[in-house]
Image: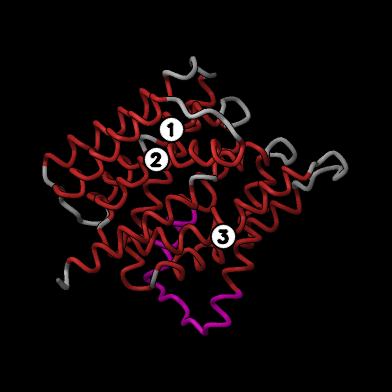
């Protein structure tokens, strides 16, 4: 039971993280309608860094050791800078719906880096169900729209690679430092550069920026950049990087479901069918991880 309890807690925490992340790409899509991509990336990281620094100070967390700095830099490169910046640029060229194609590859990328950086060794059937789940997400997304510009697609691929690396590196570090501490220290480490770039790329005028863009900035700064990682890194550390990482396959469908509930958008039967296939793939991937 001692092994089962951390696994269950890890999956529960990871699932909550995925639900929070589900609103990230739509919120980014809305935010870039009012803010330049580079400023948006730097502003969200700076805001989240201020919150993370406040938490670290109030809870009197010890400074990370020197040996942790390289890993924290990798986390910052992957999830603080790389993924937000590249997706913000990509979403100027492709729709958030098309980005689902690439988000479907994120669990596979995370699993690969779990092997390379985390020392995990999933069994062969795990890779079968991981690839099947990724293919299902990609097929669902492609069925809803045509091809986008190559530049947008290439930026999304680069974003997925960096994000998978940041997830695996952060989860490995979370086993010693704790989940919220890892993302907070990574944000603090990147803060000086992010603040300088944010000031250098301030919009020329604030008048044309509507409320939706501000709300999008607020969401990605607080929830996507900090709160979601508190649960996500804890889930990866407790339940296994490759195993819990498969929950990301559900992220696009949570996002579409939220759009249906909050915005009244129709939910197609293909979404329900694809979600059912994904749930099966996640269940079997967990069994063989």
Q: Residue at 63% across / 57% down in the picture? A: 193
- The crowding category of the residue bearing disc 1, from other C-alpha atoms within 10 Å (few below 14, some 14 to 19, many at least 20), is many
The image quarter containing residue 188 is bottom right
- Residue 23: % across, % down: 54, 45
Q: Classify mark 3: helix, strand or loop.
A: helix
Q: Is residue 37 left or right of residue 229?
A: right
Task: Name the mark on residue 161.
Answer: 2
Residue 98 belongs to the span the image colors magenta: no
Disc assigned to residue 157: 1
The mark that comes first in sequence, 3 or 1, is 1
Could you tell me if the residues under marks 2 and 1 are in contact, i.e. CB atoms within 8 Å? yes
Tell me how far mark 3 sits from mark 1, CA to CA: 23 Å
In-front residue for pair 268/24: 268
Bin the neighbour count of mark 2 within 10 Å (Cα to Cα): few under 14, some 14-19, many 20 and up.
many
Q: Which residues are magenta?
A: 54-76
Q: Residue at x 34, y 30 (%)?
A: 274
Q: In what quadrant of the picture does the N terminus appear? A: bottom left
The residue tagged with tag 2: helix, strand or loop?
A: helix
Helix, strand or loop at mark 1: helix
Q: Which residue is mark 3?
A: 190
């Amino acid at each position: 039971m001692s092994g089962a309890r951390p696994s269950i807690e890890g999956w529960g925490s990871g699932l909550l993280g995925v639900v929070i992340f589900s609103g990230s790409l739509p919120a980014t899509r809305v935010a870039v309608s009012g803010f330049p991509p580079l400023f948006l990336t730097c502003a969200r990281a700076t805001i989240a860094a201020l919150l993370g620094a406040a938490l670290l100070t109030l809870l009197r967390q010890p400074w990370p050791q020197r040996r942790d700095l390289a890993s924290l830099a990798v986390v910052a490169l992957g999830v603080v800078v790389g993924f937000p910046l590249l997706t913000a640029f990509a979403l100027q060229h492709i729709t958030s719906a098309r980005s689902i194609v690439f988000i479907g590859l994120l669990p596979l990328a995370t699993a690969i880096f779990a092997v390379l950086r985390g020392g995990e060794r999933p069994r062969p059937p795990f890779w079968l169900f991981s690839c099947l789940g990724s293919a299902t997400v990609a097929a669902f997304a492609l069925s809803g729209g045509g091809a986008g510009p190559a530049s947008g697609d290439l930026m999304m691929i680069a974003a997925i690679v960096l994000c998978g690396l940041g997830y695996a590196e952060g989860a490995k570090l979370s086993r010693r430092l704790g989940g919220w501490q890892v993302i907070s220290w990574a944000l603090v480490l990147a803060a000086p550069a992010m603040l300088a770039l944010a000031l250098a790329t301030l919009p020329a005028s604030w008048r044309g920026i509507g409320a939706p863009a501000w709300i999008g900035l607020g969401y990605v700064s607080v929830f996507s950049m900090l709160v979601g990682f508190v649960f996500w890194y804890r889930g990866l550390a407790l339940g296994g990087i490759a195993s819990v990482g498969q929950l990301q396959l559900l992220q696009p469908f949570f996002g579409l479901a939220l759009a249906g509930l909050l915005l009244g958008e129709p939910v197609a039967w293909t979404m329900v069918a694809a979600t059912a296939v994904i749930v099966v793939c996640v269940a079997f991937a967990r069994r063989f991880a």
